[in-house]
Amino acid sequence: MTRRSPFRVPATLVSAAAALVILSGCMTVHGEREILPAVSKTSAAKALQHFTEGFNKSNRTLDPSVNPSYEGGALLAINQAEIKAAHGLRPDGNPGFAPLAFTDTHFTVPKQKGWPRFFVADGLSNRKGRDGRNIRWYLVFSRDSLREKWRAVYLATFPQNKAPELKITGGYAEAVPVDGSSGLTVDPGKLSEAYADYLNTGKGDAFAPGPETDKLRAWRAGQANQPGARILWQDQASELPPVALRTADGGALVFFSTVYHQQKTVSKGLTITVPPELRGIVEGPAAKASRMAFTTVSGQAVIVPAKSTGGKITVLDRIEAKTSAKAL
């Protein structure tokens, strides 16, 4: 099923070497005027180092104010919520935290015009997967202007340790437009809304069956009505921008986010027990609450086929975390 954020539940990922390109040299970016590489190798390496240092500091101190310095978008919402929750359990921090480190790093860089710009960093971490092997993290970095720092906005892993094969031309990946010119079955800019609508209604045939589509809906339905408790839920499209890269077969690897709302009500005389690992994100007193609202942010990595193929969207990975809990 869906994973929580990566520093709580290790992920498995191996990126295909053909999809990851190491670039060198310098560049001058003229914002919206020219189509140029999004980043140089040197700047990309510095961004990954900055992420690693920030990640280690926030997980050691359990200080959620550190997260915005190296993360943004959906990944910030997910990981900052996890840090807040962990701080609730360990207010003095986690001095025994094993620092994250990367080796064998590669960078996938598209040529882009305008903002935001993005690139992907892939490194072999010192974290072990369930099979005992070191695992790779696939991080999407983005920024909105030259004055901003690069921040990691998405993180994904892939089944069977196989990354999608990206289209590489002249050493560069191809950024896919998010609007109607994408040539995909669903444009990246409409993907969050399409996925949320599907999870809400189950209608449509854009998404392939799998753990994060029909099986996720079935699991939620089973949780909705239990003895003495009822859960109402609704998915919502996110306003955070997606990131899309063309795959070798003409489709696209797309990263996007959604928001999931739950309202849990228990029978009269009963109270909702908030797990210790969530108490750090609770807003207001919830010791005797019989009705609570929860918000969850998720980040998805999917393959969207080209319109010409008539295929379905496959959800490759999904991470999530509850970002708020409030007594009603």
Image: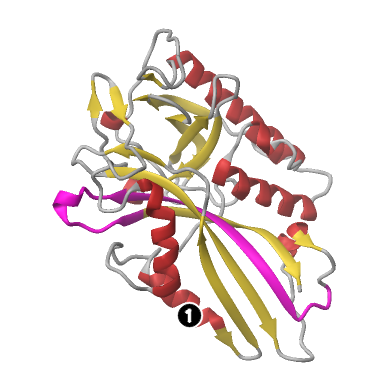
* Range covered by the magenta-colored residues: 287-315
Q: Residue at x 55, y 27 (%)?
A: 150
Horizontally, residue 199 falls left or right of residue 269, namely: left
Q: Residue at x 67, y 51 (%)?
A: 81
Classify the position of the N terminus by image quarter: bottom left
Q: Position of residue 156 (x, y in %)?
A: 44, 45
Mark count: 1
Q: Position of residue 52 (x, y in %)?
A: 59, 30
Horizontally, residue 239 falls left or right of residue 201, namely: right
Q: Which is nearer the eye, 316 or 308?
A: 308
Q: Is residue 307 magenta?
A: yes
Q: Position of residue 10 (x, y in %)?
A: 52, 48
Horizontally, residue 216 falls left or right of residue 179, namely: right
Amino acid type, label 1? Ala
Q: Which is nearer the eye, 183 or 230?
A: 183
Q: How is the image coloured?
A: secondary structure
Mark 1 element type:
helix
According to the picture, the residue beneath numbered tag 1 turns out to be 221
Q: Position of residue 195 (x, y in %)?
A: 40, 60
Instruction: Classify mark 1: residues with Cα within 10 Å, few (<14), some (14-19) or many (20+).
Output: few
Horizontally, residue 250 falls left or right of residue 153, namely: left
